[in-house]
Image: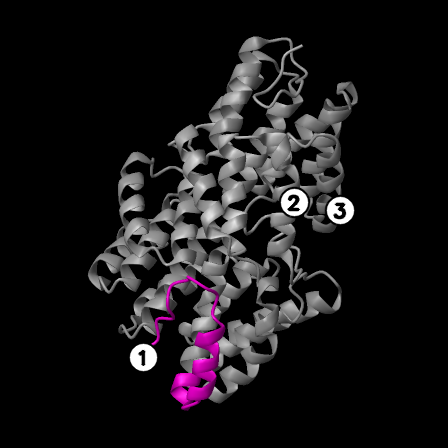
Amino acid sequence: MLTDRYGLTVSTTSSAARDAYVQGCDRQLSMQPGAEAAFDDAIAADSRFALAFVGKARVRQLRGDIPAARESMAAANVLVAELPPREASHVAFFGLLLAGQTDAALAALRQHLRTWPRDAMVLSTSATANGLIGSSGHVDQKTQLLDLMDGLAPSYGDDWWFTGHHAFALAENGQHLVARRKIEHSMAGNPANAYGAHTWGHLCYESGDLPFGRSYLRSFLPTYSREGGLYGHLTWHLALFQLQAGDTDAAFRLYSDVVAPEVNRDPAVSILANAASFLWRWELAGNPGNPEQWQTMQAFVGKMFPRAGNAYADWHAALVEAAAGDGDALEARVRQMEDLARDGRYPSGPVVPAVARGFAAFQRRDFTAAIEAIEPVWKQRDRMVGSLAQTDLVEFTLCRAYVESGRLDDVRRMVSERRTGAIEIPAPGLH
């Protein structure tokens, strides 16, 4: 019987199909380009290789091409009756994921991993900040992610992919030294692992190691294809480091050359989040705004995210609508989110609508209203979806509102409560 890189049996008798599938999985797990082509090679070698169709569906889903992803899943489902239990469960899980049945998919993931813990493709759907656990709407989702990774660690040993993601979960939970050891080991095992480079970016942000973060990403990015799905996001990390270091010219060049929607090749939700959050942070740091850039972003939002439904996209879209001065669009999005929440179909509940109203108030310089909107939900910020580095933008906005309102006791409290090691709040008048 043929097996994948994790020792799991795969239902193909073709070594060429198996080898191409393993290559596709490794490329997908490391966010290197060429995963879909490798899965196509696997299918060409064995047209009844169901897992290769699932791998292709996953690539297409992450790219944002949901109709094409469902087409690939349909091809896998035709073959499911022939599959042994592990592969049938694998196909069923991804079917739930692509159908948008988040709660059912998360329950299926936990059940699947109890029996087959080394199914890395299944685990990969929850191993990031915006994965199934991160999108669950749970306040303790970062702890849940670390508990999951800690529990699975004995099954993976020193595997480069797993240790890179384990390091990310550790960094998000303040365990910086352990995270550093793991990510060093991960990158030694596969220096081309873009998700590992991503973990380095977050770890350096959380531990305040700006010099290493800048130098590491400057050295990694030239080795990484611009077609890689994390190229724009890694550049965003570098731009934040440059902005924090005071090199505003370098930071904005990175935005203009890579992060801006007209040049960014990442999936649409990543383009939205990275571009919108950079521009907002840019202005929070005291740099002049550019209405034309926000209008470009607004056109992008109108085309790609016209309605609410994805909390991660929604709170970044709200940034854009607030900054572009489109109060009608923002209010419509807020009402859509509130309607979904009332129907139990919006895991983030009232948090994102409240933060969206806070962004709008902040932009019109009604700092009291911004504080009143954001303050009550701030303790539930994990429900918004996103890493600590991403949701920091809301903390920075609230802190700046305190500064502008002259509420210096609240500023000092916020600074004193900030997690240990993370980079400083970039708000003029704070120091």
User: Can residue 227 be seen in the rendering of this structure?
Assistant: yes
Q: Earlier in the sequence, mark 1 or mark 2?
A: 2
- The percent position of residue 369, horizontal first and vertical second, equals 51, 86
Residue 408 magenta: yes
Query: What residue sits right under mark 1 in the picture?
Result: 431
* Range of residues picked out in magenta: 402-429
**How many labels, in total?**
3
Q: Amino acid at mark 1?
A: His
Spatial separation of the CA atoms under disc 2 and disc 3: 17 Å
User: In the drawing, does residue 320 fall left or right of residue 158?
Assistant: left
209 lies above or below 283: above
The disc at residue 120 is: none
Check disc 1 and report its element: helix, strand or loop: loop
Judging depth in this view, the residue of 299 and 428 nearest the camera is 428
Circle nearer the viewer, 2 or 3? 2
Q: Where does label 3 land, which residue?
A: 104
How much space separates mark 1 and mark 2, taking CA atoms? 39 Å
Residue 72: name its quadrant. top right
Mark toward the start of the polypeptide (1 vs 3): 3
According to the picture, the residue beneath numbered tag 2 turns out to be 148
The quadrant of the rendering that contains the N terminus is top right
Q: Secondary structure under badge 3?
A: helix
Tag 2: residue type?
Leu
Side of 217 where 397 appears, left or right? right
Q: Quadrant of the C terminus?
A: bottom left
> Of callouts 2 and 3, which one flags the residue occurring earlier in the amino acid sequence?
3
Q: Residue 299 in the image: x percent, y percent?
A: 42, 62
Residue at image coords 61%, 26%: 53
Q: Residue at x 33, y 59 (%)?
A: 240
Amino acid carrying label 3: it is Ala
Q: Residues within 10 Å of mark 2 (few under 14, many from 20)?
A: some
